């Protein structure tokens, strides 16, 4: 007779209620111990997982909204943004700053980060495009009416520094205009003479114009798609002279939360993410759009 048979020799009693309750609690507890990363954004200890996203300054509004939606879909995840010029972000990453995702306003800075090993080659994808627009204070103190007016003597123009993606794009626009007979070869130099400040990112250019510290500035269309739209006037730059900015995104190779980082990139590229970007004035791309 086995041990079990010996134990029941006197007649087996049903399990005590407290034993059943304990067993159920053990099952529930075990289920709750499943990896939070698969259902939310916490780590294995149950603590909230912080996702550090390094993003170009021009993405401030759109990524703020995307971050809120992402957090709502990933309980336990906290998205923390670092919004400055792409060139500053690339340098911070080169210096070893901890990050999980990098979103740049151009491929030059993304490629620099790939070269220093923080992002794997082939991992980055274009997630949005943007275009330039000339802006001026709502009161229009310089009386701007057309692009050619940017070369008028005495105009106070604010640009981003050439190291900043939008700053280089602005210089590219001026070079195109100077090659156009409608503007003349001297146009670029005339405009450059009017620059009163070179800013560290596009948001600083916008602020200068909104505050009336500059008569005009060159920014992205997305920068004036929301709150700032009522504070500035704008002059369109035609397609032939405009420069389309391509924005790449990638998970950082040494991310402390690789699964969550990849999920964030996927969300930005998803239909929901693209709708948010479009609402903030960006030109959306198809899922998985390439450079």
Image (cartoon, grey):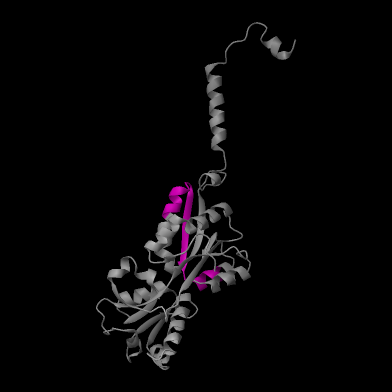
Tell me where residue 260 appears, x and y as whole percent. 54, 52
Quarter occupied by the C terminus: bottom right
- Quarter of the figure with residue 253: bottom right
Percent of width and height locating residue 131: 42, 73
Is residue 214 visible in this depiction of the protein? no
Q: Where is residue 171 shown, x and y percent of the image?
A: 45, 83
Which residues are drawn in magenta?
Answer: 68-92
Q: Depth check: 146 or 257 in front?
A: 146
Above/below status of 141 relative to 30:
below
Quarter of the image with the N terminus in it? top right
Q: Residue at x 39, y 86 (%)?
A: 195
Who's the residue at 57% across and 13% down the image? 14
- 240 to 90, vertically: above or below: below
Quarter of the image for residue 142 reads: bottom left
Q: Residue furthest right?
A: 1
Residue 8 visible in image: yes
Question: Does the magenta run of residues contain 234?
Answer: no
Q: Position of residue 166 (x, y in %)?
A: 45, 76
Displayed quadrant of residue 283: bottom left
């Amino acid at each position: 007779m086995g041990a079990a048979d010996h134990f029941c020799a006197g007649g087996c009693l049903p399990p005590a209620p407290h034993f059943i309750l304990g067993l159920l609690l053990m099952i529930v507890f075990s289920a709750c111990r499943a990896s939070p990363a698969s259902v939310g954004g916490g780590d294995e200890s149950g603590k909230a997982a912080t996702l550090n996203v390094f993003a170009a300054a021009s993405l401030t509004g759109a990524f703020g909204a995307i971050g809120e939606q992402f957090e709502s879909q990933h309980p336990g995840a906290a998205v923390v943004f670092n919004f400055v010029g792409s060139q500053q972000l690339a340098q911070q990453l080169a210096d070893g700053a901890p990050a999980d995702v990098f979103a740049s306003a151009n491929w030059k800075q993304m490629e620099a980060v790939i070269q220093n090993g923080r992002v794997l080659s082939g991992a980055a994808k274009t997630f949005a495009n943007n275009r330039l627009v000339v802006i001026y204070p709502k009161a229009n103190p310089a009386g701007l009416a057309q692009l050619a007016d940017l070369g008028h003597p005495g105009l106070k123009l604010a640009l981003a520094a050439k190291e900043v993606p939008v700053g280089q794009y602005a210089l590219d626009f001026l070079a195109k205009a100077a090659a156009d007979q409608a503007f003349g070869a001297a146009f670029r130099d005339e405009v450059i003479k009017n620059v009163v400040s070179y800013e560290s990112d596009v948001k600083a250019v916008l602020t200068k114009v909104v505050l009336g510290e500059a008569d005009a500035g060159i920014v992205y269309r997305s920068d004036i798609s929301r709150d700032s739209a009522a504070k500035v006037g704008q002059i369109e730059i035609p397609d032939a002279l405009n420069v389309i900015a391509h924005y790449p995104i990638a998970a950082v190779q040494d991310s402390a939360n690789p699964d969550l980082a990849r999920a964030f990139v996927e969300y930005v590229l998803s239909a929901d993410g693209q709708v948010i970007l479009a609402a903030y004035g960006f030109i959306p791309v198809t899922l998985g759009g390439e450079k």
